[in-house]
Amino acid sequence: MSAFHFTNLTGAAEIGANCYSIETGGRRILLDAGSHPKKAGAEGLPQLGLLQDDSVDAIVMSHAHQDHLGSLPVAMRRHPRAPVFMSEATRQLGGIMLHNSVNVMFAEQSSGSEHAPLYSHREVDAGERRWLARPLGQKFDLAGERAGTSEHAEVTIEFSDAGHILGSVGTLIRSGGRTLFYAGDVQFDDQNISPGADFPDFAQEPCDVMIMESTYGSRARPAGFTRAGETERLAQAIEAVFARGGCVLMPLFALGKTQEFLAIFHGLRERGRLRRDCPIYIGGLGAKLTEVYDKLARKTPRLQPQLALLNDVAPFVVGGQNLADLRVRPRRIFALSSGMMTEKTLSNVFARQFLDRPENSIFFVGYADPDSPAGRLRAAGAGGKISLGADHPEETVRCGIEAFNFSAHAARETIRAYVKRVKPRKLIFVHGDPASCGWLAAAAREDLPGTEVLTPAPGVRVEL
Ligand SMILES: [Zn+2]
């Protein structure tokens, strides 16, 4: 029986640069290689230096969000022989995301940042040749070959759909008769186009180790909450803003949230809750990623596969160049990235036209780090004071501020239920602040007295 060794290479116990090292059967697998959304340059990297160079046998990407993918070229440079496994959708989305990161890093440098870009377009292009897409539900070995049926065939990997965004997967590693399951980012409930996770139930084989995210561990789901109810609340809120002659800004992640909201707007139009000619604006990156959603609609787990987001919803696309010409006009929806309103992104720049106009509203619809501009603006609320960045003098928020829950992350109650059903022998919570990991760990200890629940500190190698 092979043991597993786990090292959390994330910089701190938080939602930052996700990266985990798994050693088993004499092999080493890197799970994700993210970059911290709020830190620039090498400070945003995971602790890749804790691993000897050229010591990784395979790298696995759970999905294409920056906090899981953003340091992949750096990890690949350190481990030049490791193949990189991911779903086909992540392969297509990941290239767009990394090239966008290069653009952002070069733009930061040219506007005076002391940090040199961590990688180039050329390195991303060259690296993509080592990316190997693998289908859901198919076992493969660390060379990428389809694995046989022999139960003890060294180390194998198998993906299952994680329901978080297009292409997101859970990763099951089998090694010498033992199993480790890495959930990545997960949503167990259906969203609008991403169906809920289709994770293994471990009815036929035990789960020896589970690594589970805990983004919403410190937040209870309100009683009676449903996505349909939340959509109705959103529709009423949009109607109220439009009735007073205002418009709506929704800071959204370009990947995942933008596409879910295009589907939501489509549904509202179909039901007569949103005028068909109501202009909807999205960013250029969001549009490029939406093309991949449309292209793979019938080849990936998908609700409403017939819905062609770009054609059927027909959003206007805002690029860096025409952002300066984009004006606040009544009865429009500006669904612009980034979700956290990071400085210099579309939502941050555009919000500056918004804040002093009481007829307008900003709607927050997903996770935002409390220290990000979006987190601070949400906390300040209408009537509060906010500075959106170093070049923005503090001003009073005169527009409306409302928050909705359309999360792409699982509610803590659904994580608790899944963990309880699977009964892993050992359970590790990651990807959450200490309070979030703490609540889920306490719940799991109560539900599963036979399970060892761990929250290993970053940088510490633990035997499982
Ligand atoms: Zn994610």
Image (spheres, grey):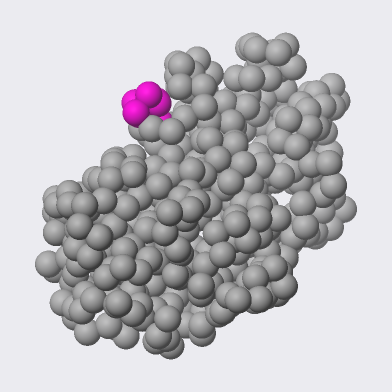
The answer, for residue 229, to whether it is visible in the render is yes
Position of residue 118 measured from the top left corner of the image (x, y, whole percent): 29, 67
**Compared with residue 395, is residue 176 higher up or lower down, i.e. above or below?**
below
* 81 on left or right of 262: left
Front residue of 436 and 42: 436
**Compared with residue 441, is residue 171 higher up or lower down, i.e. above or below?**
above
Front residue of 39 and 94: 94
Q: Which residue: 56% across, 64% down?
A: 423
The answer, for residue 354, to whether it is visible in the render is no
Q: Which residue: 56% across, 79% down?
A: 452
- Name the quadrant of the N terminus: bottom left
Position of residue 12 measured from the top left corner of the image (x, y, whole percent): 51, 79
Front residue of 387 and 66: 66
Q: Which residue: 50% across, 15% down?
A: 312
- Magenta residues span 293-299
Answer whether residue 103 is magenta in the image: no
Position of residue 28 measured from the top left corner of the image (x, y, whole percent): 25, 74
Q: Quadrant of residue 450?
A: bottom right
- Name the quadrant of the C terminus: bottom left
Answer whether residue 297 is magenta in the image: yes
Q: Quadrant of residue 206?
A: bottom left
Q: Which residue: 80% across, 23% down?
A: 239
**Compared with residue 229, is residue 119 higher up or lower down, i.e. above or below?**
below
* 365 on left or right of 192: right
* 104 on left or right of 189: left
Front residue of 109 and 316: 316
